[in-house]
C-alpha cells in the first residue's frame, strides 16, 4: 500500500501549556477522515485513550467498507445485496482475495484449486479423536486449525507470496471439512470425506449430513441458502476476530496460528454467539401470546431482558445483510415445510410485530442478520453448538484476505497498544520474613 498523504490538519491545544499541535488528517475513499496520531506521543508525551479502539483506525484497508448510519456493507466496492443475489461464495472469495470479480476462466481455475484442497491430512482423524467426545465443536476448531501448521510445513513462509497463496487456499478449502468433522465427532458419526463434484456449499452440507448408510443429496434451495449465509458473513471490516488475526499476524506468526486466534476470538458470546442468543430468547418467550409481554419488557430500561437479534452495534439503520437473509429464511422454511413449527412460527410473529411497533421502528431496532440465521440453522437441523462454527467457515476468507493485506502493507508494525496505568507507584521491596 502506498503512504497516504494528509489532506489537511487537525489542531489540538494542550490546556496545560497552551501549546498547539497540528495533526495531519488522512482521507479514505469514503467514510470519516482519520487523525494521524503516529507521532503524537513523540510530540506531546501523551498517549491517546480509546478502550475497545472504537474510535481508532488500526490500519488502512481496501477490502470492506461499512457505513452503519445508513446501512451500507460493501466488499471491494460491491453492495452486499448484489453479491448475495447474483454471485456465489466462490466468486466472493475470489473478490475478497484479489480485488476483482473473476471472469469465467479465472473462476473455473479458482474453484478447481479450492476444491482440490478440501481434503485434510489423514492423521487429522486421530487428532480429532483425541478430543473428548463431548467437546464443543469450537474447541475442536481452535485446536485443529492451529495444528494445521504441524501438517503443512511447505506454506509457512509468510514472506513468500506462493506460500501465502497456498496457505490461503488450504484454509478456505479445509475449513468446511474440519467443521463438518467436528460436528460428526460430536454426534458419534463417521467422518465423511469431501466430494469434488459438489459446489462449496453443497459439499459442506454433504459432509454434515451424509452417512456411510446413505448419500445425502442437498436441496438446491438449502444449498443456495447456505451459500448466501457464507457470502453475508465472509467479511465485516475490522471486527474483534479480524483485528485479532491482524494482531497475531503482525508478530510474523504463521497463517494457521493467526486464523486459529481469530476462531478463538469469534467463539466469544459477544461476537459470534448472537444467533444462538436469538434462539435462547425465543425459548424464553415460549409462545406467541407472550410476545406483547416481552416487547413491553424490552422497552423497560430497568428490565434486564433484551430483544436479541434486533438492532446492531455498527448498523444504526437496517442491517443490509438482514434483507437478504429474511428472503432466504422464508425460502428455507417453505422448502422444509416448517412454517408451523412452534419456535419458528413464534420467530416470524415476533418479526412481524416488531417491524410494525412504533417504538422499534423509531429506534431502528430492525431484525439483524443473526435473527434470521439462527432461525435458518434451527430449521435445517443444525444444533446451536455449530452456529459459531458455521460463522468461522464463512469468515475464514475475510480473515485470510485481511491477513494477506496486512502482511503486504509496508507500513504495518507489530501490534502494541498502550495503556493508562492506574496501579501502585514505585514501592520499596520488603523481604519475606519482614512482611507483616
Image (cartoon, grey):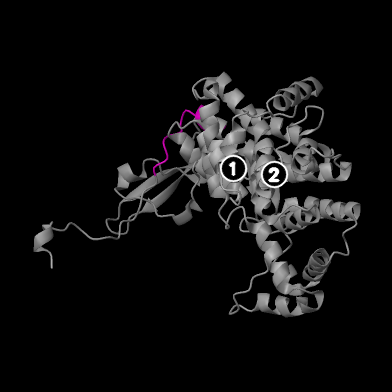
Residue lying at the far left of the rendered structure: 434
Residue 325 badge: none
| Mark 1 and mark 2: Cα distance apart in space | 13 Å
N-terminal of the pair, mark 1 or mark 2, is 1
Decide if residue 397 is on the left or right side of residue 79. Answer: left
Residue 430, x across and y down, in percent: 11, 59
Residues in magenta, as a range: 405-416
- Where is residue 280, by image quadrant? bottom right
Residue 319, x across and y down, in percent: 71, 55
Secondary structure mainly formed by the magenta segment:
loop
Residue 186, x across and y down, in percent: 65, 48
Say which of 142 and 133 sits in front: 133
Secondary structure of residue under mark 1:
helix
Query: Can residue 27 be seen here?
Result: no
Secondary structure of residue under mark 2:
helix
Q: Residues within 10 Å of mark 1 (few under 14, many from 20)?
A: many
- Where is residue 343, by image quadrant? bottom right
Q: Residues within 10 Å of mark 2 (few under 14, many from 20)?
A: many
Residue at 16 percent across and 58 percent down: it is 427
Residue 184 badge: 2
- Where is residue 256, by image quadrant? top right
200 vs 45: above or below: above
Q: Which residue is mark 1?
A: 141
Amino acid at each position: 500500500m502506498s503512504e497516504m498523504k494528509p489532506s489537511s490538519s487537525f489542531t489540538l491545544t494542550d490546556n496545560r501549556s497552551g501549546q498547539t499541535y497540528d495533526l495531519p488528517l488522512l482521507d479514505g475513499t469514503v467514510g470519516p477522515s482519520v487523525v494521524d496520531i503516529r507521532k503524537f506521543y513523540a510530540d506531546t508525551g501523551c498517549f491517546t485513550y480509546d478502550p475497545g479502539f472504537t474510535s481508532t483506525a488500526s490500519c488502512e484497508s481496501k477490502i470492506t467498507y461499512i457505513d452503519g448510519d445508513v446501512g451500507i456493507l460493501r466488499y471491494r466496492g460491491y453492495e452486499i445485496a448484489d453479491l448475495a443475489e447474483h454471485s456465489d461464495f466462490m466468486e466472493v472469495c475470489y473478490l475478497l482475495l484479489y480485488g476483482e470479480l473473476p471472469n469465467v476462466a479465472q473462476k473455473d481455475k479458482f474453484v478447481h484449486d479450492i476444491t482440490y484442497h478440501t481434503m485434510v491430512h489423514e492423521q487429522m482423524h486421530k487428532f480429532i479423536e483425541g478430543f473428548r467426545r463431548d467437546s464443543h465443536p469450537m474447541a475442536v476448531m481452535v485446536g485443529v486449525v492451529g495444528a494445521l501448521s504441524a501438517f503443512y510445513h511447505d506454506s509457512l513462509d509468510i514472506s513468500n507470496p506462493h506460500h501465502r497463496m497456498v496457505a490461503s487456499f488450504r484454509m478456505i478449502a479445509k475449513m468446511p471439512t474440519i467443521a463438518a468433522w467436528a460436528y460428526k465427532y460430536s454426534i458419534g458419526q463417521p467422518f465423511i470425506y469431501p466430494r469434488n463434484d459438489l459446489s462449496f456449499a453443497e459439499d459442506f452440507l454433504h459432509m454434515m449430513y451424509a452417512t456411510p448408510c446413505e448419500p445425502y443429496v442437498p436441496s438446491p434451495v438449502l444449498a443456495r441458502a447456505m451459500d448466501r449465509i457464507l457470502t453475508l458473513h465472509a467479511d465485516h471490516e475490522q471486527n474483534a476476530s479480524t483485528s485479532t488475526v491482524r494482531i497475531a499476524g503482525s508478530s510474523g506468526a504463521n497463517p494457521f496460528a493467526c486464523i486459529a486466534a481469530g476462531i478463538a476470538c469469534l467463539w466469544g458470546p459477544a461476537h459470534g454467539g448472537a444467533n444462538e442468543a436469538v434462539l435462547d430468547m425465543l425459548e424464553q418467550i415460549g409462545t406467541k401470546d407472550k410476545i406483547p409481554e416481552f416487547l413491553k419488557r424490552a422497552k423497560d430500561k430497568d428490565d434486564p431482558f433484551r430483544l436479541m437479534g434486533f438492532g446492531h452495534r455498527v448498523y444504526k439503520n437496517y442491517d443490509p445483510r438482514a434483507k437478504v437473509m429474511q428472503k432466504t429464511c422464508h425460502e428455507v422454511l417453505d422448502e422444509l415445510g416448517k412454517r408451523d413449527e412452534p419456535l419458528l412460527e413464534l420467530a416470524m410473529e415476533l418479526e412481524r410485530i416488531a417491524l410494525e411497533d412504533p417504538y422499534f421502528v423509531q429506534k431502528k431496532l430492525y431484525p439483524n442478520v443473526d435473527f434470521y440465521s439462527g432461525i435458518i440453522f434451527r430449521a435445517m437441523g443444525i444444533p446451536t453448538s455449530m452456529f459459531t462454527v458455521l460463522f468461522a467457515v464463512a469468515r475464514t476468507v475475510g480473515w485470510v484476505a485481511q491477513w494477506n493485506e496486512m502482511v503486504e502493507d509496508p507500513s504495518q508494525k507489530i501490534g502494541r497498544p498502550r495503556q493508562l496505568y492506574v496501579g501502585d507507584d514505585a514501592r520499596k521491596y520488603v523481604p519475606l520474613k519482614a512482611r507483616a
